[in-house]
Amino acid sequence: MPHTVLLAEDDRAIRNALERALTLEGYHVTAVADGVEALAQAHRSRPDVLVLDVMMPGIDGLQVCRVLRAEGDRTPVLILTALVETADRIAGLDAGADDYVVKPFDVEEVFARLRALLRRAAPVTAEPERPEAPGPAPSGRCLEAAGLRMDPQARRAWRGDRELELTRTEFELLELLIRNAGVVLEHSTIYDRIWGYDFGPGSKNLAVYVGYLRRKLDEPGAPQLIHTVRGVGYVLREG
């Protein structure tokens, strides 16, 4: 079955071109012109992924995302935005979006990001596990490094006693860093492992996600945990 995409874009030319390109790529696309229609369509028939323009009349793409997340809908969301400032991108992540593409964009980049979102959202087939006794997760199931603790199966993470509220992408980025604590991970390696595609040296996507993750991890008076190795990548360590 082809993956279903709900596309909301008020610019008719962009909407028609992207709908045509996605259809040729094998997706089943429902295209709407504003946020009100997007919410109505999402409630009628839940898509596999949403592609939302930020600047739309009435209800914009970020508001659509906030409403869906407030309802408990975790469908992957890709934001299309002409806003290039870091604060604008962080606003999209704050709204619950999983990724974004800056206009003007290459349609191949949209395809790559959609493939990555759909891979991460795909259910994992596993053998049934024995029921566990109530209480904290067994230590063997948790990852620990630099004062952080993570339970990949339960999708939960803590710094000390404080539980972290992470999006899907943030969780996967932090898991990668914890599993490689003390090791400098190159930009290309992180892009490949998290997004399945290296967006090149000009992309700020990774820097934005690292910055947003730092905001959730860092505490006053405590050492920063994610360190930048200029020109190379990032490393998780204390001090």
Image (cartoon, helix red, strand yellow):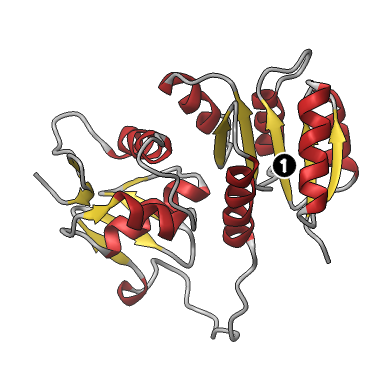
Q: Is residue 133 visible?
A: yes
What x and y, as percent, mark residue 108? 61, 46
Please tell me which residue is depicted at 34% across the width and 58% down the height of the picture.
189
Q: Nearer the viewer, residue 104 or 232?
A: 104
The answer to whether residue 46 is seen in the rendering is: no
Which quadrant of the figure has residue 124?
A: bottom right
User: What percent of the width, then of the height, locates residue 51?
Assistant: 70, 38
Residue at 60 percent across and 61 percent down: it is 119
Residue 15 in the image: state x and y as whole percent. 80, 30
Q: Which residue lies furthest to the top in this view?
A: 57
Residue 177, placed above or below residue 232: below
Asked which secondary structure carries label 1, the reply is strand
Task: Write down the quadrant of residue 25 in the picture.
Answer: bottom right
Is the C terminus in the top left, top right, bottom left or bottom right quadrant?
top left
Vertical order, 133 against 16 (above or below): below
Q: How crowded is mark 1: few (under 14 residues within 10 Å), some or many (20 or more)?
A: many
Q: Is residue 8 left or right of residue 163?
A: right
Task: Name the image quarter holding the N terminus.
Answer: bottom right
The residue furthest right is: 44
Residue 118 falls left or right of residue 207: right
Amino acid identity at mark 1: Leu
Q: Taking 80 as reference, is 156 left or right?
A: left
Along the line of sight, the residue nearer the viewer: 94 or 4 = 4
Residue nearer the viewer, 59 or 34: 34
Residue drawn at (84%, 32%) of the image = 16
Which residue is disc 1 drawn over? 50
Residue 215: where, in percent of width, then height?
33, 32
- Which residue is most to the left? 239
